[in-house]
Amino acid sequence: MIPRLWSCTSHPQLEWLALPFNPIVLLGLFLLTAALPANASWSFRALRLWQTLLAAVLGSIALIALAAGVSRALGGRGNPVFVSARYVFPVAAWAAVAVGLAWGSRSAQRVDTLEQGVQRVGPTRLLIRVSAVLAALLLMLIVARQFIADFQRPWSLPYEIAEWYFDDATMDLASDECLAFRVTDDLARHGSSDPGAAARYRLRRSGHSAVPGVADYLADRLVSGRFCPGGPCGASIELLAFLAETGDHPLLAAYDRYPLLMTREMRKCLHSGRKVKWAVETDWQCIGPAPPAQTTVQ
């Protein structure tokens, strides 16, 4: 699963099942390959396993992106394909582990003499060691991100800029729930484009078909345990208004406990027979004729 692209809600069981595709695991396995002696059979096993996993994760990403593109070309939507990635990745990951272990075992059996192993001490081995230094630096950056919150400036700024450009470059491949995430996350401007506004536009263009993805994201915010002033972090008035455009969605009542998110007012509007409209300038509007005033007969 790829955060910020196809998976922006919590799925701990699936994340553990897809662990072989985790970048930390891939980088760690590559570093292990570089650290083992050149003539060690386990060096070949680790190398083949890493190569198989890398090819499998890149191939899975390419196939899912291709399937989504074909679906869109035929008049459908790519979001169901992107959502299915969280179930495809665990299967592909462990299939790659099995293939990589078998390939590594066959490679190790062919290392019968020291001379065969010494063949790797030339330019190939040097390239692996240089690449290992770069991999170690990348691994340190990825691990450090887990302990740096967005508000910890300036340490978080390089990560925010990298994530901003990643979001900007992958807008066509993002799932609906990740588009909802980007609406509230990509608020700062780090260049000429605006991924947050682009994500907002794509959700509006998708209309009601994007409601399930947005609802999944907002439901995940409720159970995330992370709270900001006004309500759960990542939840916003405009995303809730997007749900309210389809009627009194059950999530609106769940957010009633957070007055600043204005779901009570939205539901009051809906119950009066009017409609809620997601408005960019004012977050939301209550449109339609006002209900007639009640008069009491003396």
Image: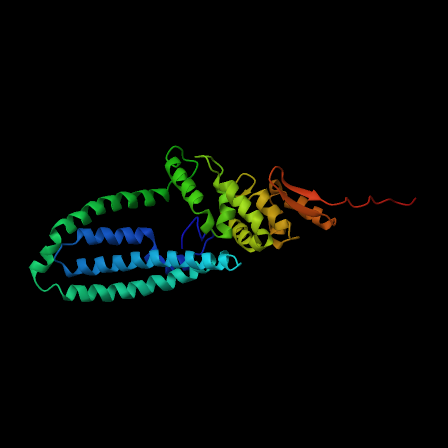
| Residue ID at (44%, 36%) | 151
Please provide percent x and percent y for residue 146.
37, 44
Please provide percent x and percent y for residue 17.
37, 61
- Can see residue 234? no
- Can see residue 159? yes
| Residue ID at (56%, 53%) | 210
Residue 58 image-quadrant placement: bottom left
- Which residue reaches farthest front? 73
Look at the image and tell me in which quarter the N terminus lies: bottom left
Residue 168 to residue 79: above or below:
above
Residue 149 to residue 89: above or below:
above
Please provide percent x and percent y for residue 244.
64, 49
Look at the image and tell me in which quarter the C terminus lies: top right
| Residue ID at (51%, 60%) | 74
Please provide percent x and percent y for residue 173.
45, 51
Q: Is residue 189 left or right of residue 23?
A: right
Q: Is residue 222 left or right of residue 51?
A: right
Most foreground residue, 262 or 100: 100
Residue 229 to residue 99: above or below:
above
Most foreground residue, 73 or 66: 73
Most foreground residue, 290 or 72: 72
Q: Is residue 253 left or right of residue 3?
A: right
